[in-house]
Amino acid sequence: MLIVTVSGPDRPGVLAALSQILVKHHVAIADMKQASLQNLLGLYFLLDVDIAAKTKDAVIKDLLFEASELGLSLDYQFVSSSEENAISQPHHHVLTHFGGTPYLAELSRILTEESVNIEGIASQTHHGARSVDMVIDVSQASSLARLKQRIMAKSRELNTDLAVQRVEAYRKNKRLIFFDMDSTLVDMEIIKAVCWVEELVRTLKWLGFKTGVVTGGFDFFSDYMKKKLGFDFAFANHLEIKNEELTGRVTGKIVDAAEKAPIVNQSACDEGVLLDQTVVVGDGANDALMLAQAGLGIAYNAKKRLDRVANVSLGKTRMAHVFHLLGITEEDIQAAAECKPQ
């Protein structure tokens, strides 16, 4: 395998010129990445030159010549099978934070101390909040769990929101979302929806998401929330009623921590949705199992220990950051608001 890196002034036709050389020498591209910033180009190839074994020198010579003609710098390096396997392993994560410069400074310090390399950064303002997405390489980190624990703790200390996702999961479109109820959808077990939730659910449904609530509370309240917010599903404990009076007993399966995760799993299965495409939002220890199995587990205004299994930590009243994490645009929100029920 041959690693080729190209850098210099960006211009149309660079990839076309270099790829024609690869075709000429029957060289296959095993992996590639490109980034451009302010007319500067960074291009990476991992090339399989096994078929072109007799013409390796000719391939390199032609690539070097073409790069020189284009005013670009080109470096190359042969790698062994074991090195190639290490390169091919999925070590990349997307780290999203909503903090300012102080948090960026603290976060980058932690990443340095944990031997994590930042490979790409993009910032944007979305739904009134500024966020920064970082693509990070954790292949040299001694412990991903310790890295996550440190950045989550710093996020909590500085009261900023943070998300860490595998690149593969980050790129998958989410299709199913479940919310816990008490302290997530409602405050202090009072039927009063937390801010932004109604707008969020309306937009998600307009985009084709299936939505639901799963709670260790009672179905009287969850059914109310289902009707109020338009959820597709509501799972809760059922209070027995006899002679039009509550008996105080619970009938059917108890919806507890052990039951919540299978409910989400089965719902995803019924809808034909991969677990990587599910989102779960919760705040307490009884949400840990269902958050851990979801493609995106969001700890909302949560207890400290929930950070260990969640890959997102959001502070109270900042549910709107879910819009950004799911790639929902201002145009989507506006279109959903203007859409009239059929």
Image: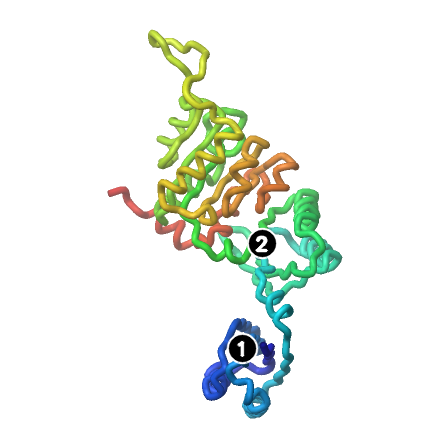
Is the C terminus in the top left, top right, bottom left or bottom right quadrant?
top left
Q: Please identify the residue farthest to the left as the structure is shown.
A: 342
- Give the vertical position of 192 relative to 196 (above or below): above
Q: Residue 168 bears which disc, if any?
A: none
The secondary structure type at the circle numbered 2 is strand
The secondary structure type at the circle numbered 1 is strand
From the top left corner, tell me how far across and down residue 218 is, in percent.
45, 22
What residue would you read off at disc 1? 48
Image depth: mark 1 or mark 2 in front: 1
Please name the residue shown 39% across and 52% down the image.
332
Counting the numbered discs, the total is 2
Q: Is residue 13 visible?
A: no
What residue would you read off at disc 2? 96
Q: Amino acid at mark 2?
A: Thr
Quadrant in which residue 268 is drawn: top left
Mark 1 or mark 2, earlier in chain: 1
| Front residue of this view, candidates 225 and 93 | 93
Q: Is residue 263 visible?
A: yes
Q: Amino acid at mark 1?
A: Asp
Find the distance from the CA under tag 1 to the CA under tag 2.
Answer: 34 Å
Please name the residue shown 47% across and 51% down the image.
326
Q: Is residue 196 left or right of residue 316?
A: left
From the top left corner, tell me how far across and down residue 316 is, in percent.
57, 38
- Give the vertical position of 281 relative to 64 (above or below): above
From the top left corner, tell me how far across and down residue 209 is, in percent.
38, 45
Quadrant in which residue 82 is drawn: bottom right
Please name the residue shown 58% across and 62% down the image.
89
Mark 2 surroundings: few (<14), some (14-19) or many (≥20) residues within 10 A? many
Please name the residue shown 55% across and 54% down the image.
166
Q: Is residue 342 left or right of residue 230?
A: left
Mark 1 surroundings: few (<14), some (14-19) or many (≥20) residues within 10 A? some
